[in-house]
Image (tube, rainbow, N blue to C red):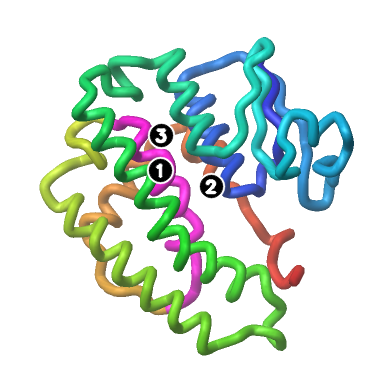
Amino acid sequence: MLTIYGRTTSFNVQKVMWLVGELGLPHVRRDVGGKFGGTTTPEFLAMNPNGKIPVINDDGVIVWESNAIVRYFTARYATGSWCPADPGRRAQADQWMDWIATTLNVGFMGLFVGYIRTAPERRNWAAIRADQERCAQDYGLLDRHLAQRAYMLGETITMADIPVGASLYRYFSFDLDRPPLPHLNAYYARLTARPAYRQHVMVPYDELKGTL
């Protein structure tokens, strides 16, 4: 049986759970991390020495890092659909997943931690404004990319959509100024029409506000 370790309010866990929902994979999820703790136990550290969520155990196959888990699930259970079979298209999916992790998430997570997770009286507004501008640039790039396509690689959703799509619920919920993003808004509307996205990504995060 597939076991997923991680709390539902974790952005990285949401990426995994969204895909699990899309693929209809039978599973058990265990609350770990945040208020639940459990990431420093010997048992958990034996699975992930970094002590971070998510972690999966798929009948003995243990994987950590959310994008690695997404790649594993799509390769094992959805090659030819969520995981492109053509090496060139798969590389294009990989490049966007890596770009999200190394570029877009820098500003996005900075904004989430600095504005949402940090108590109002401790906010660093210079850093928040810098992350806000960085997000405007990076999401603007995505908006231009999506001007001629429904999803990241074309007309069909793939693993490339998981990391960027998972960030949009939170980004669009921030009560901060954003540039006009018509194509990204249309893309987000397509994602919100998917039941698995609504169930696993559109999760309230009030419990995380002002906790730092």
Give the spatial CA distance, label 1 vs label 2. 8 Å
Q: Is residue 3 left or right of residue 186?
A: right
Under mark 1, the amino acid is: Thr
Q: Is residue 157 left or right of residue 32?
A: left
Quarter of image, res 45: top right
Residue 166 is at least partly visible in this image: yes
Give the residues drawn in magenta, as a range: 157-176
Count of number-bearing discs: 3
- Mark sitting on residue 194: 3
> Residue sitting at 27 percent across and 23 percent down?
84
Q: Residues within 10 Å of mark 1 (few under 14, many from 20)?
A: some
- For the residue pair 167 and 104, the one nearer the viewer reads as 104
- Badge 1 or badge 2: first in the primary sequence: 1
- Element carrying mark 3: loop
Which residue bears the numbered disc 2?
202
- Element carrying mark 1: helix
Residue 30's x, y, as percent? 76, 30
- Badge 3 or badge 2: first in the primary sequence: 3
- Element carrying mark 2: loop
Under mark 3, the amino acid is: Arg
Residue 36's x, y, as percent? 84, 45
Q: Are marks 1 and 3 in contact (CB under 8 Å)?
A: yes
Q: Are marks 3 and 2 in contact (CB under 8 Å)?
A: no
Residue 1 is at least partly visible in this image: no
Quarter of image, res 39: top right
Under mark 2, the amino acid is: Met
From what the image shows, is residue 8 above or below residue 196? below
Residue 69's x, y, as percent? 53, 30
Which residue bears the numbered disc 1?
192
Q: Are marks 1 and 2 in contact (CB under 8 Å)?
A: yes
- For the residue pair 39 and 150, the one nearer the viewer reads as 39
